[in-house]
Amino acid sequence: MKQTGLIIVLSGFSGAGKGTIMKHLLQNHPGEFNLSISATTRKKRQGEVDGRDYFFKTREEFDSMIENGDLLEYATFNNNSYGTPKSYVEKLVNEGKDVLLEIEIQGALQVKKIFPEAVLLFVMPPSADALKERLVGRGTETEDVVAERLAISNKEAEFMPQYDYLIVNDILENAVEQVYSIISSEHSRTARNVENIEKIKQDLKKFERS
């Protein structure tokens, strides 16, 4: 009996490596997962394709999606809005496909409210000092920006208990396989296999003894 797909959400501190884990998960297990495509009010860049990179929307269209409850979650950065279209995710899940969302903490908790069965994974480094080293090691942010990101991480840590699983990204390969193992285990939950359970129960009735 074919299951519906899973909604898997990855969040974590800036610099924890959630994007890298997502990239390697897709590379190591081609064809097994579908990345959610976000809607955005941002202008299309050269080479980008509507429906592949983003669903490009006008401000009016995006606001209408919010009003109609068509977004699982949304947020605004640098005057551009981004959100996860509900219908797109539902379509993939109903086709039995697993959908990966890499989104911020507030968005992840919004998704959990709409889809309580969504699996929330929080990615963290082995220590706070390791997080600072990774942010500094990027060489792309000023000292003030690094300090600001660490202060934000301090606040974000308060939401960690609301996630289903914690992924400690110390050795990348191990973290990637941990995520994959969690997803595999979630598919085997009895709550996700009600139809299979009922089918075997009915089949076994032919062996019933009076």
Image (cartoon, rainbow, N blue to C red):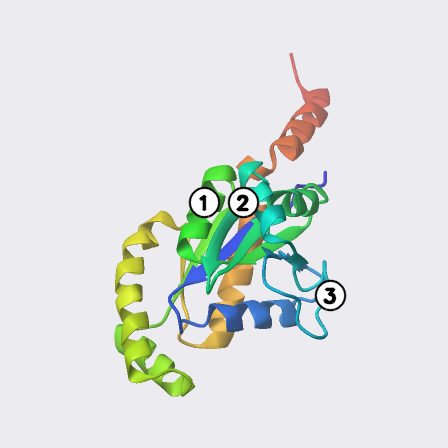
Residue flagged by tag 2: what amino acid is it?
Leu
Residue flagged by tag 1: what amino acid is it?
Gln
Could you tell which of marks 2 and 1 lies nearer the N-terminus?
A: 2
Contact, mark 3 vs mark 2 (Cβ under 8 Å):
no
Q: Is residue 195 above or below residue 88?
A: above
Location of mark 2 (residue): 72
Location of mark 3 (residue): 49
Residue 116 image offset from top left, x and y in percent: 48, 39
Tell me: 205 left or right of 84. Answer: right
As measured in the structure, the alpha-carbon distance from the residue carrying label 1 to the one carrying label 3 is 27 Å
Q: Mark 2 Cα within 10 Å, few/some/many (few <14, many 20+)?
A: many
Residue 130 image offset from top left, x and y in percent: 31, 78
Please name whichever residue, 191 or 122, is drawn nearer the observer in this view of the structure.
122
| Residue at 69% over, 41% down | 94
For marks 1 and 3, give the one nearer the viewer.
3
Tell me: 18 left or right of 95. Answer: left
Please name whichever residue, 88 or 57, is drawn nearer the observer in this view of the structure.
57
Could you tell which of marks 3 and 2 lies nearer the N-terminus?
A: 3
Q: Is residue 145 above or below residue 182?
A: below
Tell me: 61 left or right of 73. Answer: right
As measured in the structure, the alpha-carbon distance from the residue carrying label 3 to the one carrying label 2 is 22 Å
Name the image quarter holding the N terminus.
top right
Location of mark 1 (residue): 110
Count of picture labels: 3
Q: Quadrant of residue 128?
A: bottom left
Residue 144 image offset from top left, x and y in percent: 28, 79
Label 3 sits on a secondary structure element that is loop
Residue 73 image offset from top left, x and y in percent: 50, 48
For marks 3 and 2, give the one nearer the viewer.
3
